[in-house]
Amino acid sequence: MNSFAGERSDPLHGLPRVLMWSVIGALLLLPAIAMQFTREVHWGPGDFLFAALLLGGLGLGVEWIMRRIGGQTFRIAGIGVLLLTIMLIWAEGAVGIFGAA
C-alpha cells in the first residue's frame, strides 16, 4: 500500500475488473457486428436489452462475490453457480428448453 491516501502501488491492480467489463462489452457488440455480415443473426432492441441485463448482472454478481466472499474456493464456487444460472437463463430465452410449450 502506498502511504498516500491508501492507494495501492500495484500498477495492475484494476486490470481484471477492466478486462471483465471489456469482455462483457465485446460480447454485446458481437451480434451487432455479425448482423452486418449475415442474415442468420436477427437481434432486435429487446434482444440486446436482455443480453445487456444478463451480462451486466453477471458482471455485478462477480464484483459482489469478489468483494464480499472470502476464500478462493468459495469465490470459484459462487462464480460457477452464477455462470451456470446465467447460461440456463440464456438458453431458456433462446430456445425455451424448460417446457414453455
Image (cartoon, rainbow, N blue to C red):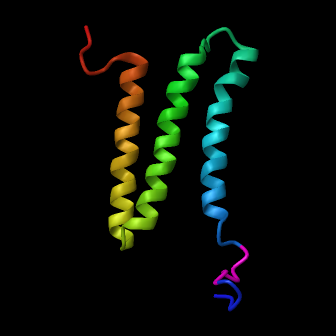
In reply to whether residue 61 is colored magenta, the answer given is no
Quick one: which residue is furthest to the bottom in this view?
A: 3
Q: Quadrant of residue 36?
A: top right
The x and y percentages for residue 20 are 60, 52
10 magenta-colored: yes
Left of 12 or right of it: where is 69? left
Q: Quadrant of residue 7?
A: bottom right
Which residue is at 51% across, 39% downward?
55
Q: Nearer the viewer, residue 8 or 71?
A: 8
Which of these two is toward me, 60 or 101? 60
Q: Which residue is located at x 39 percent, y 66 percent?
A: 68
Vertical position of residue 14 compared to residue 42: above or below: below
x then y, percent, for residue 76: 38, 61
- Relative placement, left or right, of 32 versus 84 is right
Residue at 36% x, 67% y: name it: 69
The quarter of the rendered structure image containing the N terminus is bottom right
Q: How many marks?
A: 0
- What residue is at 45 percent from the left and 66 percent from the top? 67
Farthest front residue in view: 5
Q: Position of residue 29 (x, y in %)?
A: 68, 31
- Residue 24 versus residue 79 in the image, above or below: above
Q: What segment carries the magenta color?
A: 6-11
Where residue 28 appears, as percent x and y from the top left, is 63, 32
Question: Magenta: predominant secondary structure element?
Answer: loop
Q: Which image quarter holds the C terminus?
A: top left
Question: Does 26 sit above or below residue 93?
Answer: below
